[in-house]
Image (spheres, rainbow, N blue to C red):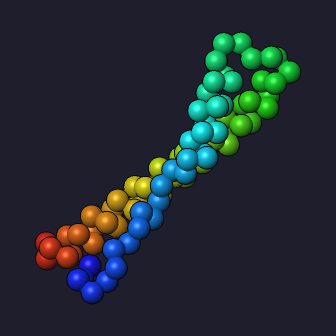
Amino acid sequence: MSDTTEPQTCRVQLEENQLAEIRDLVQRLRGQPDPEKVRGLLVEARTALVGLLDDRDDLVRANADAGAELARWRGEI
């Protein structure tokens, strides 16, 4: 990182609409859902979990990259 470059915006972030969908899904999973809707809810839950795990992996990589960039900037690497 140098003084002549523009600061990067957050490269990875959980989007508000994704967060709202997950919160809605959690509400619909509470109690005893309609047996006819359980399969669809499980598919939605699996999709949401896969998305969250992908986002988590992206965040871990972004944090590692940012840490390495900061260390290079500070001359620690």
In the rendered view, tell whether residue 47 sits above or below residue 40. below
| Residue shown at 72% from the left, 31% from the top | 42
| Residue shown at 27% from the left, 87% from the top | 4
Determine whether, in the image, residue 12 is placed left or right of residue 39.
left
Instruction: Pick whichever, 65 or 25, lies toward us.
Output: 25
The answer to whether residue 49 of the structure is visible from this angle is no
Determine whether, in the image, residue 61 is placed left or right of residue 45.
left
| Residue shown at 61% from the left, 46% from the top | 17
The answer to whether residue 40 of the structure is visible from this angle is yes
Residue most extreme to the top = 32
Determine whether, in the image, residue 46 is placed left or right of residue 52.
right
In the rendered view, tell whether residue 76 sits above or below residue 2. above
Q: Quadrant of the C terminus?
A: bottom left
In the rendered view, tell whether residue 15 sits above or below residue 37. below
Residue most extreme to the right = 36
Q: Quadrant of the N terminus?
A: bottom left
Q: Position of residue 58 (x, y in %)?
A: 47, 58
Which quadrant of the view contains residue 38? top right
Determine whether, in the image, residue 52 is placed left or right of residue 63.
right
Residue most extreme to the bottom = 4
Q: How many marks?
A: 0
Q: Position of residue 66 (x, y in %)?
A: 31, 66
Q: Position of residue 35 (x, y in %)?
A: 82, 17
Instruction: Pick whichever, 20 or 61, lies toward us.
Output: 20
Instruction: Pick whichever, 20 or 42, lies toward us.
Output: 20
